[in-house]
Image: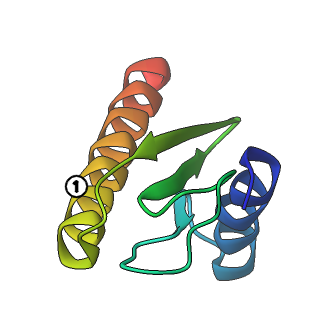
Amino acid sequence: MSEETIRALAEGGRERLKTEFGAATSGIAGPGGGTPDKPVGTVWIAVAGPGETVAKKILLSNNRLVNIRRSTVVALNMLRKLILKSLANRY
């Protein structure tokens, strides 16, 4: 799990599904599976659109359900911002 990997996932999903936008998340939701370098709660998120891909690493808690929910909210907000930016650049 790295920035390079998550960017490739978002861009690859967009290309494969032939969509204008794509999103991807990857991480260690917990409660186990963490390492000293990548502790539980480490999540990478990327969104890809026409001409731009944005990636972000977030650090959450060790609560699996909370981590999944928060990651989803962050991913959807990143996607919303990229869509708005893309629309603004068209006009």
x and y percentages locating residue 1 in the rendered image: 72, 62
- The outermost residue toward the front is 36
x and y percentages locating residue 5 in the rendered image: 79, 59
Residue at 18%, 67% (x, y): give it.
66
Q: Residues within 10 Å of mark 1 (few under 14, many from 20)?
A: few
Answer left or right for 31 relative to 6.
Answer: left
As drawn, 1 above or below 30: above
Task: Give whichever of 68, 79 is nearer the camera.
Answer: 68
As drawn, 7 above or below 52: below
Answer left or right for 12 relative to 67.
Answer: right
Residue at 43%, 36% (x, y): give it.
82
Q: Secondary structure at mark 1?
A: helix
Figure quadrant of the C terminus: top left
As drawn, 75 above or below 90: below
As drawn, 44 above or below 77: below
Residue position marked by numbered label 1 in the rendering: 73
Q: Quadrant of residue 18?
A: bottom right
Q: In the rendered picture of this protein, how many numbered marks are placed on residues?
A: 1
In the image, what residue type sits under mark 1?
Val
x and y percentages locating residue 62 in the rendered image: 31, 65
Answer left or right for 9 relative to 24.
Answer: right
Residue at 28%, 76% (x, y): give it.
64
